[in-house]
Amino acid sequence: IDIIRAVRKRNGKGKILVLSEGEEDIPLLRELSVQKIIRPDFEAELEMARQVLLHLDFPAPSVQNELNALRRVIYEPLYQVLPEYEVTSRLQAAASLMTMEWAFLDTESPLAGKTLAESAIRRKFGVSVVAVGREGKVISNPDGDFLLRPGDYVGIAGDPELNMKFLLSLKDGSQKEDAV
């Protein structure tokens, strides 16, 4: 608490993240305008529940939604004082539902020899190309003029189901010009 007060004294607008051992700390932390309070015991319990549910083959998005609902209940007092806390928490939760996958482009791939714009991956599959691995290097955030080549690894990010649709289109023999 003394450290938080010292930080506030030096920089009243600084963002502060705090690990809190229990609910009794939350009112004082709210009073000190702490932006993010994390309860390690609670987060550890949620992570254990997440691992168990995923091990039992529950769908990852459903598990994440339920865990986020529990977080909202526990952290609700903070949301009432700092509305931006809930917004950033929801954005972080949404980001955690996205996954990244890599697809290898062989010489037969209909994507090889096309630019990202020509491939229309985002329009056709709803996933974003966030990186390309080529010759041992990673090119992040390639633009629409980026030319895909055989031997490239295409890094896509998106909803797990849409990622799978894209990956299957490259592997299932439907690699016709209109399929991808």
Image (cartoon, rainbow, N blue to C red):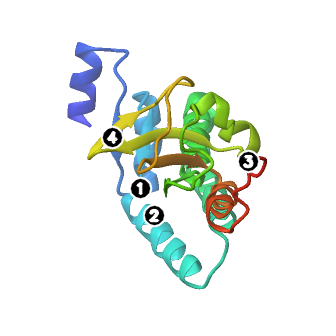
Kindly report the distance in space between the C-alpha atoms of the residues bearing marks 2 and 4.
37 Å
Earlier-in-chain disc, 3 versus 4: 4
Kind of residue indicated by mark 4: Val
- Residue at 64% x, 44% y: name it: 127
**Outermost front residue:** 107
- Residue at 46% x, 68% y: name it: 47
For disc 2, the marked residue is 42
Closer to us: 20 or 174: 174
Disc 2 and disc 1 in contact, CB within 8 angstroms = yes
Kind of residue indicated by mark 2: Phe
Disc marking residue 39: 1
For disc 3, the marked residue is 177
Kindly report the distance in space between the C-alpha atoms of the residues bearing marks 2 and 1.
5 Å
- Residue at 74% x, 37% y: name it: 123
Disc 2 and disc 4 in contact, CB within 8 angstroms = no
Residue 125: percent from left, percent from top? 72, 47
Which quadrant of the view contains residue 13? top left
Kindly report the distance in space between the C-alpha atoms of the residues bearing marks 2 and 3.
50 Å
Residue 149: percent from left, percent from top? 46, 42
Kind of residue indicated by mark 3: Glu
Kind of residue indicated by mark 1: Arg
Which quadrant of the view contains residue 82? top right
